[in-house]
Image (cartoon, helix red, strand yellow):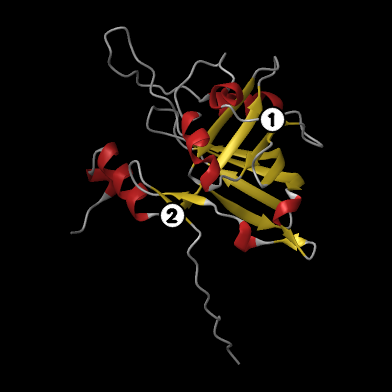
Amino acid sequence: MDVVPSQLAHRELYNILISAVGPRPIAWVSTVSASGQPNLAPFSFFNAVCAKPPLLAFAPGMRAPKKSDGTAESAGTPKDTLRNIRETKEFVINVVTSELAEAMNLTSGDYDASIDEFELAGVASAPSKVVRPQRVAESPVSFECKLHQILDFNTGPEGGSLVIGEIVSIHVDERHLKDGRLDRNSLDLIGRMGGLQYTRTAERFEMVRPKVE
């Protein structure tokens, strides 16, 4: 089968993307509004970008607002996370382990901006060192970020933005340190697959890269 993206319905194209591009790491992003309201939400369009400068990026999609008759508006509505970052220029990306999976999933709902997802999911918050948003205390690694750039691709309900943040501080739980370095094998991280599926990264294998003379 060969398909042209422009000839597919949005749902069909989206399903191909999330089913084939995986496992995707999960950015559990904590933000705070300009008025001080906390927010916590997961995003699976997420990855590292660069080490110098240290950049991370995630891509929140737009919400599809509803008309009074139940149909979707032509323009999308930014999610609380994106709106908060535009207002404050700060955020924290917390990594998600298998132990935190249920709590992370609870924060994925389309809640009103007045809801504190930390309280909703029963996860503890901890103060950050540099930025205003709190980090997830149970997360083994949290990246405090200052906004570097936002790229907007489409303002419609099927669009999204790419948020690039510069890491200004990193919290690593000492229980995941070995000889003073992060022990990657101790991190039972999860990844997002298609639909409702997730995967654990506990099963791993090594391969040596070829040396080219």
Task: Please identify, in this view, whether the residue under mark 2 or under mark 1 is nearer the observer.
Answer: 1
| Residue 124 vertical position relative to residue 43 in the rendered view, above or below | above
Local packing at callout 1 (Cα closer than 10 Å; few below 14, some 14-19, many 20+) is: some
Local packing at callout 2 (Cα closer than 10 Å; few below 14, some 14-19, many 20+) is: some
**Nearer to us in this view, 93 or 197:** 197
The quarter of the image holding the C terminus is bottom right
Q: Residue 74 in the image: x percent, y percent? A: 35, 21
Q: Using the numbered discs, state the Cα–Cα distance from disc 2 to disc 1 in whole angstroms.
A: 27 Å
- Disc 1: which residue: 125
- Name the residue furthest left: 1
Q: Is residue 125 left or right of residue 162?
A: right
The amino acid sitting under disc 2 is Pro
- Residue 23 is tagged as 2
Give the mark nearest the N terminus, 2 or 1: 2
**Nearer to us in this view, 165 or 40:** 40
The quarter of the image holding the N terminus is bottom left
Q: Residue 88 in the image: x percent, y percent? A: 70, 26
For the residues labelled 2 and 1, say whether their Cβ atoms are less than 8 Å apart.
Answer: no
Q: Quadrant of residue 169?
A: top right
**Could one spot residue 60 in this view of the protein?**
no
The amino acid sitting under disc 1 is Ser
Element type at mark 2: loop
| Residue 155 vertical position relative to residue 161 in the rendered view, above or below | above
- What residue lies at 42% left-to-right and 25% top-to-bottom? 63
